[in-house]
Amino acid sequence: MTTSSSGASGRRRRALLAGLITGTSVALGAGACTPSGTPSTGASSTSASRPPATSASTTAGTATAGETTSNSSSSSSASTSVDPIGACVDTAVAGLSEEEQIGQLLMVGLDAGAGARGVDSAVTEHHVGGVILLGGWSGAATVTAVTEHLNSIATGPKLFLAADQEGGQVQQLKGAGFSTIPSATQQATLGPAALREAATDWAQELVDVGINVNLAPVADTVPADIGTANGPIGRYHREYGSTPAAVIPPMTAFLAGMHDGEVMTAVKHFPGIGRIRGNTDSSATGITDPTTTLDDPYLEPFRAGIDAGTDFVMVSSAAYPKIAAAQALFAPEIVTDLLRTRLGYDGVVITDDVGAAAAVAATPIGERATKFIAAGGDIVLTAKASDIPVMARAVKAELADEEFAAKAGAALERVLTLKARRGLLDCS
């Protein structure tokens, strides 16, 4: 992705930075612009196909990657094309307060036991940008009532409404109206064409109940010599294969099917948790991967997911000492240098849960948000609604640091660009 001048992106981010620091209205042009006005993909490669995309005022059309053109006859050349996505983001940012901007960088979990109103304050007071349904929800009618309620109380940009609908033992939405989805290991036996078709049907079930994001597919490779001894993935048969070559075809077929059904995807758990023994959700031990390097073949499924146009990449909370000293989600060497620069991903990066997860329990709640954003991440996901005000205050306080504020501004730009592309911004 290029712009009409080398300083354009910096000017946009400085404008957004000013809005984050002062809370005033600002206008910016999003970086995802093309000659035809359609958005680029999350990858810097222009070869990846995309599912149906949305402009500021319509939900039709297909996005194609491309580059802006410039007027070479003038030293102050500017793009000659109209960018509806950038204009939509301009409009959205101009109407957001500082608190609302910060909220777009947060996603909160709504447990089935908490009922439909369990995160109302996170949505109405702290303006979170997304909600994920957790804890096992039963029946399409129940889920529809919840998503309709959440949409009715949200102001500003529409919500990312997410679920973990991988299949097998990780399927949060079940019962009437939902298929019983096989595990990833079983899905891989269907063949790519059949799996893509099935995933399209599963996506439609999500759309029907108001879910627009599936935090799947798993791109982790679990080597055969570890297998079910791998706590987070292998134990539950969440992997598509025991080699990267085996993982890529079914993983990308699932992703493509979700996109065919107009559901956003998140490949996870970058840079891979198939080689650890402990489960980051429940343990702070056994979560160090001593093997993965910057040029590791186990990164290839993530590269394939990026090339296929995934909307999000979820970063793990495991540690990778051959790449960085800090845990992945807090390491700029992983989030920025590896994922964004080496793999060319410029889309939205989201955390694994940092609320209830044992892997991050030693890190103060507010720092879980600020360290992730400082590393180059975009959306902080917590299963605990009580974390949201703490995280929002921490981010606001950290905005006094110019470097952090610039990174928060870039994160907001990426989040709102994706929302504009998916029809979640009303720019009429």
Image (spheres, rainbow, N blue to C red):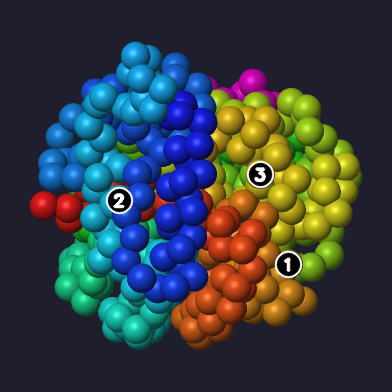
Q: Which mark is residue 151?
A: none
Q: Looking at the image, how many numbered discs can be counted on the residues?
A: 3
Q: Residue at x 86, y 54 (%)?
A: 325
Q: CA distance from mark 3 to mark 2?
A: 23 Å
Which-is-in-front pick, marks 1 and 3? 3
Residue 224 shown left or right of residue 32 in the figure: right
Question: Which residue is at 74% across, 75% downward?
Answer: 363
Sequence-wise first label, 1 or 2: 2
The residue wearing badge 1 is 359
Along the line of sight, the residue nearer the viewer: 348 or 280: 348
Q: Are marks 3 and 2 in contact (CB under 8 Å)?
A: no
Q: Amino acid at mark 1?
A: Ala
Q: Indicate the secondary structure of the residue bearing disc 2.
A: helix
Q: Nearer the viewer, residue 428 or 202?
A: 428
Residue at image position (70%, 79%) is 364
Looking at the rendering, which quadrant does residue 259 occupy?
top left
Q: Mark 3 — residue?
A: 336
The answer to if 243 sits in the magenta stretch is yes
Stretch in magenta? 241-250
Badge 1 element: helix
Q: Is residue 424 above or below residue 312?
A: below
Mark number for residue 89?
A: 2
Residue type at mark 3: give it.
Thr
**For residue 313, above or below residue 98:** above
Instruction: Between label 3 and label 2, give the one nearer the viewer.
Output: 2
Q: Of label 1 and label 3, which has the lower sequence position? A: 3
**Alpha carbons under labels 1 and 3: distance apart:** 21 Å
* Residue 65 horizontal side relative to residue 408, left or right: left
Within 10 Å of the Cα at label 1, are there few (<14), some (14-19), or many (20+) other Cα atoms?
Answer: many
